[in-house]
Every structure is written in C-alpha cells, then in structure tokens.
Image (spheres, coloured by chain):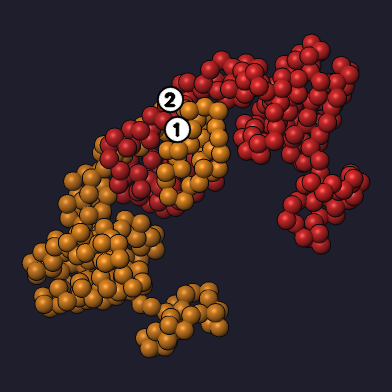
Chain colours: A orange, B red
Amino acid sequence: MKLTSKYLENAVDQLASLPGIGKKTALRLVLNLLNRSEEEITAFTSSFQEMKLHLKKCIKCGNITDEECCVICSNDNRDQSIICVVEDIRDVIAIEGTGTYKGIYHVLGGVISPMDGIGPSDLNINSLIDKTSNGRINEIIFALSPTMEGDTTNYYLYKKLNLYGVLITTLSRGVSIGTELQYADENTLGKSLLYRHPFQTNI
Amino acid sequence: MKLTSKYLENAVDQLASLPGIGKKTALRLVLNLLNRSEEEITAFTSSFQEMKLHLKKCIKCGNITDEECCVICSNDNRDQSIICVVEDIRDVIAIEGTGTYKGIYHVLGGVISPMDGIGPSDLNINSLIDKTSNGRINEIIFALSPTMEGDTTNYYLYKKLNLYGVLITTLSRGVSIGTELQYADENTLGKSLLYRHPFQTNI
C-alpha cells in the first residue's frame, strides 16, 4: 500500500504497530482521526501521554493505579486475607466484572513461559511470598488461564506458598454455562466429572 | 467494564472512539502502549498531531497531500486528460495498487446519500465540472462503489458532465476473478453476460 503523504504514512505505521491492527485498518482509523478538529486530536493524543506519565503499579498488588496504592487494596471493605493471583490487569477487570469477589488481588505481570524466556524472576512473585509469609493471609486463589504456562506457574507458586500452611485454591474447571455437552472438549468434560459437586437448587 | 484508573479509562475511551474498536480491544491496545518507552509514546502521539497539522487536500483533485498539489497531479508522466472519479482516498490507494492506471484522479469526498443527509453540494463536484468544461479532458471514468448511493452519484454526475461532450466510462461490473460461477449473485452474473466482450488470449 503506497501512500501519497509521508505524514499520513507515519500515522498509519504508528497505529499499525499496535497488535492486531493491519495497515488497511490503520488507514481507516487515521482517516477518521483526520476528520476531527485539532482539539479532538489533542484530546486523543494527550490521553496516551498522560496515561504514561501518571499510571503506576500498585505497591501492594501490582495492579495499575493513579495513586501509590490501588482502589481495591486501599478499600477497607475488601477482605485483605484472601488474595486472588492473576496474570495481568485484564483478569482483574474480568473478575471484578462478575461482582462476586470481595478479596484483594495479586498481579503477576505474566506467567512462567520458558519458550518466551520468562522465568519466575521476571514475575511479581517475591512480594506474593512476602505477603504470605507474614501470616495474615488465609486463602490464596490461583486464577491463571488453564494453559500449559498457567499450570506451570500454578505448580511453581504452590511449591513456594504451601510451606506457609495457607489454604490454596484454584478456579474450578468445568463445562461453560450455555455449552452443549456434546461439543465440550474431552479434557474439560473429564475435569467437570472429576470435580462434580452436590446439586444445589438455589443456583 | 470498570477500570481502576481514570487515566487508563480516558485512554481506553479515546481509542474506543475510533470506528470498529470496542472497549476490550481498546484496553488491549492501551496496555500494549503502556509497555512502551516515553519516546515511543511521543512518536506515537506526535504522528497524529503532525498529520493534522501538515496534511492538506490537493487543490486539483482533493486527494490528501503534504504539498499544495499531490504527487499524482504534479506528475508530468500521468495523462492529465483522463480523470478517474472516486469516493475517497482509499479508492485512490486501491487503484494505484493495481499499477494499471496512468491518468489522474478526482476525489469526491463521499457519495450522494439522502439517507445520511449528503447532497451534491456537500461533495467536491463543482471543481470536477469546471475541469471538464475547460475542454482539456478526454475521458472521465466513474469508479464509485456499485451501491445504490454510488449509482445515484454516477447518474447525477453523468447528467452534469455529459453536456460537455466528454467520453464518460465506468468500471466494468462482472464476475470477480477466482469466484465460482454458481456462487456469483444473480445481478452481477446478469451484468457480466450483458457486458460480455470478445475473448482475448493474452489476458
């Protein structure tokens, strides 16, 4: 795709540097921006500058925050003795979206993946061990994705944290709500049989 | 989707204001930006600022350009007596991509669409009539999309331009290359029969 303007080309290249955005899509988006006023463009661009300038990682959990400590960790109504371990902040948002969790989080910033050269030392693991060792934690919930890397990380964390006698749980695996049983994969169906639980009429 | 930072939320909202980008995609893109250095963020944002500052419409054809006159109109090797009429600059890029067109363009900036409140006066039509009336144009090619709006615009332009005795042509309609005939829609197949042409062995 050859463009007739180097400024246009530069803007398209910058947008196309984002994951999942190709050159054709980038051009469509850039032409949309071009139709906006200068003030709107400034609002658009300064939002990214300000985000980079002001966003910090929460010193307690690693979540993204405007302050030193995120709104979840600094909320006295949350149960500070239950920690949900997640890969990144999108998982925090997803779990918060369910409205069913009242504990706090710990964001690892990734999962152990030797193929990508990511080892335990690259992740936010030491502060989780520190928190656990001080004795004020009752339960740690592993909420990593059910992938090879997620399971490897779960196993590593279990070995480290189990020393402190804390209850370690993991999200249940099973058939998704709305799935037709015949289309569920064998592994998931097997796990949902293994972890079957007493039938309850109130859910 | 509730975010724990107003800066993050602002950046997500700005990206999600682009067409076809939802909040979840915007968050994924913003987190990718957040992992970049300050210099990279500045390069990202200034590309849009500079584009807005420097890009102009070519005074001859309405194409987007860095100079007063675009590289196509100012190219002496292009045949200035053939004008290809297109809806927007993405069509210019698409036709240039074929490498088969050596004339110049005229970018309307849209098509007549009463449903969207776009009439002839909202489009770059008068300058096309001026160009045609000065007698130096031999052919005008209508290259608008084969939609209701495109056909309406073609008809309007034909009525205006036909007075000047210039040859008016349109892109051929027919079966796409690579299409299996049984899957072609009836309208297209009908048109491709109507406009059949002598068989040539060199294409």
The residue where tag 1 is placed is A10
Across and down, in percent, residue B144 comes to: 74, 35
Can you identify the residue that label 2 sits on? Answer: B50
Q: Position of residue B13 (x, y in %)?
A: 43, 42
> 10 Å neighbourhood of mark 1: few (<14), some, or many (≥20)?
some
Residue A16 in the image: above or below residue A79? above
- Foreground of the two, B40 or B10: B40
Q: Position of residue B196 (x, y in %)?
A: 89, 46
Question: Can see residue A96?
Answer: no
Tell me the element at label 1.
Answer: helix
Q: Mark 1–mark 2 contact, CB under 8 Å?
A: yes
User: What residue is rendered at 65% in x and 36% in y?
Assistant: B99
Distance Cα–Cα, label 1 vs label 2 = 9 Å
Q: Looking at the image, is B1 positioned above or below residue B70?
A: below
Please tell me how many numbered marks the rendered image carries. Answer: 2
**Chain holding disc 1:** A
User: Which amino acid lies under the numbered mark 1 shown in the image of this protein?
Assistant: Asn
Q: Same chain for labels 1 and 2? Say yes or no.
A: no
Residue A179 picture location, percent across and down: 53, 76
Q: Residues within 10 Å of mark 2 (few under 14, many from 20)?
A: some
Between B117 and B171, the residue placed more toward the observer is B171
Q: Quadrant of residue B134?
A: top right
Does residue B54 appear left or right of residue B190 in this picture? left
| Residue located at (31% from left, 58% from top) | A88
